[in-house]
Image: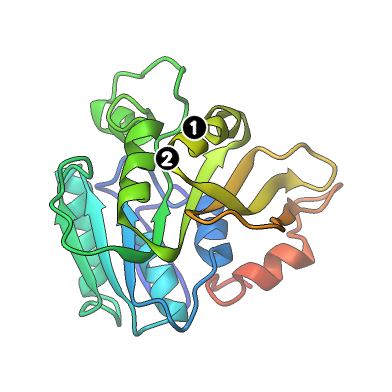
């Protein structure tokens, strides 16, 4: 998925100005995150290309989305992608630091694919470093924003590498947040999970939704049926 654009069934994502490209994991994140008919206001933290906002609006076109992006080039590209979509009136692209953004209301749904590899060495590409490393946005920063801006019945959806999730999860209690659902993503059948989508709420649930998804079959590069069913509304090839 490293082409200059990626065409979905109902929208196209251009990504040549963005450090972090469209990924299979991000597509799973957008497709699996629950969207209710009652959801009205959405916050997309670090929108990048605008992918997640557009995926969510494909399922509920009555929502409005504030999509915040710190990188000017990425914000410009997200705005262009949104302008060419069916839902340009629903999405407000803002180039800003989420830590200082002046919020005026709370949100039914917050979605974020935060920087990966908290302890890994940064590379020479400064733009990619901001997109991929937590030097620009720590997990504490993210959880503080989620805790302060999620309505009482709201849900936040966060995609993390499985190893990073082990550091992320213990921080939740400090911000009054609880896991209500979790998707473990396996690159293929029989392999360990390498990504986790966590659903967060400010209300503790007696029962936590636990699901897993295998992307490819065990002994081939063919997609699994579960992956096909999840992404079929989006992928042209499915």
Question: Residue at coordinates 56% horizontally, 31% vertically from top-left?
Answer: 170
Residue 15 visible within the image: no
**Quadrant that contains the C terminus:** bottom right
- Whole-percent x and y of residue 209? 70, 59
Question: Residue at coordinates 60% horizontally, 68% vertically from top-left?
Answer: 231
- Whole-percent x and y of residue 99? 21, 40
Secondary structure, mark 2, is helix
Left or right: residue 105 compared with residue 166: left
In front here: 168 or 88? Answer: 168
- Whole-percent x and y of residue 165? 57, 34
In front here: 75 or 22? Answer: 75
Residue extending farthest top: 121
- Whole-percent x and y of residue 91? 24, 71
Left or right: residue 169 compared with residue 227: left
Left or right: residue 219 compared with residue 179: right
In front here: 71 or 141? Answer: 141
Marks 1 and 2: in contact by CB < 8 Å?
yes
Q: Please say which color scheme the image uses.
A: rainbow
Question: Residue at coordinates 69% horizontally, 72% vertically from top-left?
Answer: 229
Query: Would you call the spot at circle 1 few (<14 residues within 10 Å), some (14-19), or many (20 or more)?
Result: some
Question: Residue at coordinates 76% horizontally, 46% vertically from top-left?
Answer: 188
Query: Would you call the spot at circle 2 few (<14 residues within 10 Å), some (14-19), or many (20 or more)?
Result: some
Q: CA distance from mark 2 to mark 1?
A: 7 Å
Residue, disc 1? 171
Secondary structure, mark 1, is helix
Residue 158 visible within the image: yes
Q: Which mark is residue 175?
A: 2
């Amino acid at each position: 998925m490293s082409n200059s654009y990626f065409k979905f069934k109902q929208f196209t994502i251009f990504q040549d100005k963005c450090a972090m490209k469209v990924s299979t994991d991000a597509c799973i994140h957008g497709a699996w995150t629950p969207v209710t008919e009652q959801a009205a206001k959405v916050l997309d933290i670090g929108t990048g290309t605008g992918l997640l906002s557009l995926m969510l609006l494909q399922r509920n076109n009555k929502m409005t989305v504030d999509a915040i992006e710190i990188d000017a080039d990425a914000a410009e590209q997200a705005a262009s992608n949104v302008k060419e979509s069916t839902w340009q009136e629903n999405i407000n692209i803002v180039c800003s630091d989420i830590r200082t953004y002046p919020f005026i209301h709370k949100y039914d749904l917050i979605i974020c694919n935060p920087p990966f590899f908290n302890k890994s060495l940064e590379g020479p590409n400064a733009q990619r470093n901001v997109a991929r490393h937590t030097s620009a946005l720590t997990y504490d920063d993210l959880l503080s924003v989620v805790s302060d801006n999620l309505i009482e019945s709201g849900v936040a959806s966060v995609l993390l590498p499985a190893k990073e999730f082990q550091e992320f999860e213990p921080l939740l209690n400090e911000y009054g947040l609880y896991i209500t659902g979790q998707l473990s993503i396996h690159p293929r059948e029989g392999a360990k999970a390498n990504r986790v989508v966590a659903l967060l709420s400010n209300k503790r649930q007696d029962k936590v939704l636990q699901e897993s998804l295998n992307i490819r079959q065990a002994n081939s590069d063919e997609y699994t049926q579960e992956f096909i069913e999840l992404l079929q509304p989006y992928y042209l090839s499915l």
